[in-house]
Amino acid sequence: MRNHKLIRLMCLILCAVMLAAGCASDDDSDKKEKKATKAPEPTSTEAGPTAEPTGETTPTAEPGVPVSYDFNSVESDLAQMIREAVEQYNKEDYTPLSEPVKYYVLWLGFTHVTFGDLDFQMTDFDRDYLQAVTLNYEKTVESISGHNVDITVYLHFVDETVPLTQYPGQDWLYLDRNTVMPCINHYMEGREIDTVLTTVQTAGEENRARNEEKDGYGVHDVILGLKTDGIESPIGYSTFNLVTPAAGTYPLENPEIPSLYATAVAVHEWMHQLEHLKKVLGVEYPNTHAYMGPESYPGYQKYTADLNDYDFFEFYKLVLSGRCPYTGNGSVKHVGMYPKMWPLIKRNITQLGHFTIKAADGSGYLTGQEGDVSLTLSDQACVWDIRYSGNGHFILSPKELPNVRIDLGNAWDSEGNTIGLWHYTGYDDAQSWYLSLNADGTYSIKTPYPSGRVVTAKKGEKALLCTLDAADGVQRWIIEAK
């Protein structure tokens, strides 16, 4: 979808130049018109920074200041998808998609992992079992969804030795995404991938015999499951321990029936990746732990593992089919994945493209660098990924550092607080921003917190959160598509 306002402005400028020169030409018909990256309309009409009226007046640039890319006026397929999904949700309409969503999973089995002297390896049985788990996951989710999603799993075993990482402040170990990113990139090359799942094995008699006399065995173990990134990030990532199958559950009798404990763990961690739909759509969407009931999750009923179904799978089924009962305001609403929500979990569906963010006064580019959590101005352009986060918010991450984003220090909405780069923390308002369009076509990067303060930068100093027009620094930005 083209940015019609920007195109009209360019046409007016072009015509003025041509008239001033006393000439007109039809020779420009072969010039290609550059398409603007699609951007969503805000999903909320509540008062706030995105609710500022812009009318139909094209922003007027100051002399020497080009007009920024216009996020707020470009029509968006994504905004339409969001509206249709919310409408289906509100009506409790389960009309299936005309075609299932194609969803691609890269699943890596790391056969040899270590932590200090501890040495964990998969056996041949573990390899065979993991193949059954991936099939069980694929067919189970497809069946529960009413075949609104068509999952393809690419399973690869990685035999090189890979170190585990200790979870901060805990004895638990896990397979850190940054550690295995080169391997992920290798297997992703040339493929469309929507999420990555990784699995190791620390259980079993062989691993016990190999490690029981070593320091840390029985103290350090691989965390059962860990979701680190979902649809709020450029690509999802979850990691978990394979765990030995219970007697009588393997081999599979029917791949569409969730009969393996490791399948339950895989589905559970992957479901965590979908929870960001709550923010994108602005609707009630269940936390994956809501089976714990109203004491921890008001409005949800409690489920018991193994009595109702294997490891809370009864609850998982209800969520993945959009039929999980939620009691709010005295009435019952069925929540979870409705058919038109499935397209919204695709990788990069919320990504608007790559951009540079330049100070309107020409003093530099907003820049984030590897190994430095600060945000500053630089003479060198930094390319940013900008993603729609829901409710009119955007996430801004350096293209070369997709695992971090612009972050308000300690989530403190206070004058002069430091703004830097940090990994996803779960504090969404501290890591998402309004892109507030100014009259001259530039943007202010505004916090969604009540103060409405903006990203403010000076050359050679860390970026700060300051009141608009109250700080001696850059607060207006030219955001241009790359």
Image: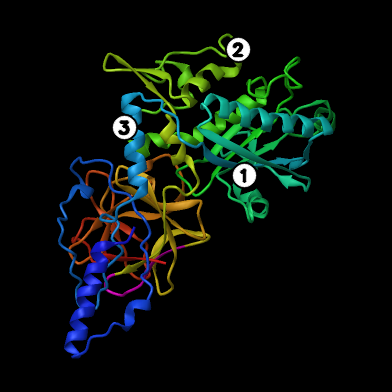
User: Where does residue 199 sit, x and y in percent of width and height?
Assistant: 68, 37
Above-or-below relation of 307 to 211: above
Residue 34: within the magenta? no
Magenta-highlighted residues = 360-368
Query: Which of the 4 image quadrants contains residue 426?
Result: top left
* Amino acid tagged 3: Glu
Q: Nearer the viewer, mark 3 or mark 2?
A: 3
Identify the residue at horizontal 73%, vertical 32% (top origin): 130
Mark 3 highlights which residue? 87
The Cα atoms of the two marked residues, 2 and 1, are separated by 30 Å
Identify the residue at horizontal 31%, vertical 69% (top origin): 359
Residue 367: within the magenta? yes
- Which is more toward the observer, 430 or 401? 401
Which type of secondary structure does the marked residue at label 2 adopt?
Answer: loop
- Which is more toward the observer, 428 or 7? 7
For the N terminus, which image quadrant? bottom left
